[in-house]
Structure formats: structure tokens, C-alpha cells
Amino acid sequence: MCRIAFFCIPAWGHTNPTLQVVKALTEQGHAVEYYSFPPFREAIEAAGARFVNCDAGDIGPEVPGGDVARDILASTRLMVETTLRLEGMALKSLAAFRPDVIVADSVALWGRLYAMKLGVPCVCSTTTFAFNKESAKVMRTGLRELIGMLVRLPRVGRMMKPLRAAGYPVKGVMDILNSADMPTVVYTSRAFQPCAETFSDNFAFVGPCPRPVSEPMEKPERPLVYVSMGTVLDGEHDFYRSCAEAFRDGEYEVILSVGESRAPADPPENVHIYKRVDQIAVLRVADAFITHCGMNSASEALYCGVPLVTRPLTPEEGGVANRAERLGAALRLADTTPEAIRAAVDAVLGDAKYRRAAQTIGEGFRRCGGAEEAARVILKACVA
């Protein structure tokens, strides 16, 4: 039996892909502790892990907006503060658990630092595209932002001093960020990963690991359009209202998953509004998905062979949207008017090439091995 500790940030898009991996490990008889935050406890325990409460407080998956340089400074500060804030609890718990390996989300750098300090093998869990200088180009960072980042790098380096004082053997932030020699589980395929040929065999592209459908949906007679802008951001009321107006003629069935955003008033009968849905169940019967193109949501849709109409809100989402569009499975919205939304959906549903491309990507995902392959990579690190 191996003992495995997972560390993640408080975001469903980073947590969901790992849950089937945890389930595969616990069903094989391995012990898993999962260091996370209260909203995720039920799902983590349902996967068979022991939940360890990190008490989210002011720790969140997002950093303040602005240019890349400010985000790097804010991200580094968040990483340092979180590492030191959780250190007492985490190191005490890890000492009692004695893990054979730590699996740390690519953003939960504190998990990697604890592994470094304890001398425990670490596996990186990457729920976005794998990152190196080549794949970073899909984010299309501007020259002005890059110059700003370089100017501030010495300041980023100075922020490592509290970590060194606390016994972490790091000279600079790249000591933590660099995972080229670390076993890394990436929840996509090599075919979908940009610049896949630049990544070594240390990167295991296992494909998405979606959970099973809990309550299957029946496919409606009319084409079904699913709309969701994710669980992290709210305030999308105007966009959801435009979507409701775009489909008022009743040609399509529409599901709007609006989260904490204010629901559109007086929607037509064919537009069904929910705060949350069983996304996999909906995608199994959907014909098109209007999405912000977060990696988890886009991957689940493509896994199900559903073409995308994209409205990315961050550079990372723009990279995912670009890749899906390049492979022929997506169309980006020209703007957010009802007319533009309707035109994009009509185009995607009116041309079978989008569905065929999405199905091809999905078939590639399913050949990657999924949760069982991810578990194999983690267990190999246990006995290394």
C-alpha cells in the first residue's frame, strides 16, 4: 500500500480532474490524504480520500488583475504567504501520515515546497496545458508585459527570502516553477497539447478524467445548446441575457448554468436556467457548448464530442480556445450581441465539420488512459 498526499487550490477546474484519480487509487487499496478547502470536502471524501482542511480564508485561485508582471508578483506573494500560513498544520499532518509521494497541483506550489522540505518524491498535477517557453506562446503575451515581467524579476527573487529563512532550499522562483525533471500528470492528450513534441517523457498526457454521470438526461427532440461561463467568475448577467434573447424563437432547447450571476428575467420557454447542473450529464446530450473555454469545461465537452462556441475571458482560456479552433472544433464569438451568439451557434450546428473535429479530439482523449494511467504514474513515483 502506498500513502499519497494531494494538494490543490480552491477551484473546481483544478479539483475535478483529480477526483477520479483519487478514486482509482483508493479502490486499489492505497491511502490518500487530500489537502483542500471546505467547499470541496464532500466530493473529495466521496472519492475515498481523507479530507484535510486547509481553511481557505483569503487564499483563492485568482490573483489581482493587471499586467503579467503584477500578476507574477501577486502570485509569488500568494505562494509564499500560503506556504508559511499552512506550514505548521500541513507539516504536522504530513509527519503523521508519512506519505510516499506528494501530488501537487501546478498552482498549489506549497505542496511542492513541502515535498522539497521533507525529501518526499513529488508529482505535478497539471489541469491546464503543460507549460514551457514554447507552449507559453499560445498565451500571446505582449512585449510590454514581458518587459515589465523582466524588470520585476529581481523583486520576485527577493520574495523568496522568507522561504529560505524557513528552511526551504530555494534560490529563486524558477526552482519551484521548473518541473521539467518531475513526473507530471497532464489532463489532456499530446494531440491537444500545443508544442507537445517539446515535452519529455516525464510528462504523462493522460487525457481528461471526467466523473460518471449521476443522473442521465434524455436528449430533447430539438438541438440542445448548453451555456456556462464557469464557476470562478460571476457578473455575467448581460451575457446570459443576450443568450436568452438569441434563442427566443424556440428553434433550440437551451440550458443556461448561471452560477452566482443574476438570471435573465422573463426567459422564453425553451431556455432553462439553473445555478448548477450536472455538466457531464448535459454534455452527453448537448449539440453545442457556449463556454469561457476553461480547460476543464472545454475538455469535458470535447471528451463528449461537443463542438464549442467560445468566449474566453483570460489569457489561459484564450490559449485553450485557440487550440480548439485550430483543430477545427470551435468558433470564437465575434461579439456578445444576441445576433452574434445566434450566428455562431447556427454556424457550428450547420456545418458537420465542427462535430467531427470535436469527436476526433474526444476519441484521442479516451485513448490516453485517463485516471488509471494517472494512478500508474503516481504509484511509480511511490516506489522509485
Image (cartoon, grey):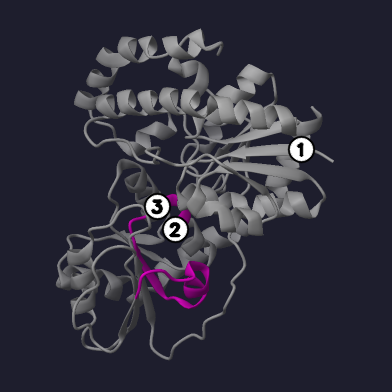
Look at the image and tell me in which quarter the C terminus lies. top right
Identify the residue at the far right of this view: 1
Residue 277 image position (x, y, % from top left): 44, 71
Q: Amino acid at mark 2?
A: Ser
Q: Amino acid at mark 1?
A: Arg
Q: Residue at x 49, y 25 (%)?
A: 83
User: What residue would you read off at disc 3?
Assistant: 294
Please give the range of residues in magenta.
274-298
Could you say whether the residue bearing mark 1 is in a helix, strand or loop?
Answer: strand
Q: Quadrant of residue 264?
A: bottom left
Q: Earlier in the sequence, mark 2 or mark 1?
A: 1
Residue 239 image position (x, y, % from top left): 21, 65
Do the residues under discs 2 and 3 have CB atoms within 8 angstroms? yes
Q: Residue at x 60, y 24 (%)?
A: 114
User: What residue would you read off at disc 1?
Assistant: 3
Look at the image and tell me in which quarter the N terminus lies. top right
Residue 282 image position (x, y, % from top left): 47, 74
User: What residue would you read off at disc 2?
Assistant: 297
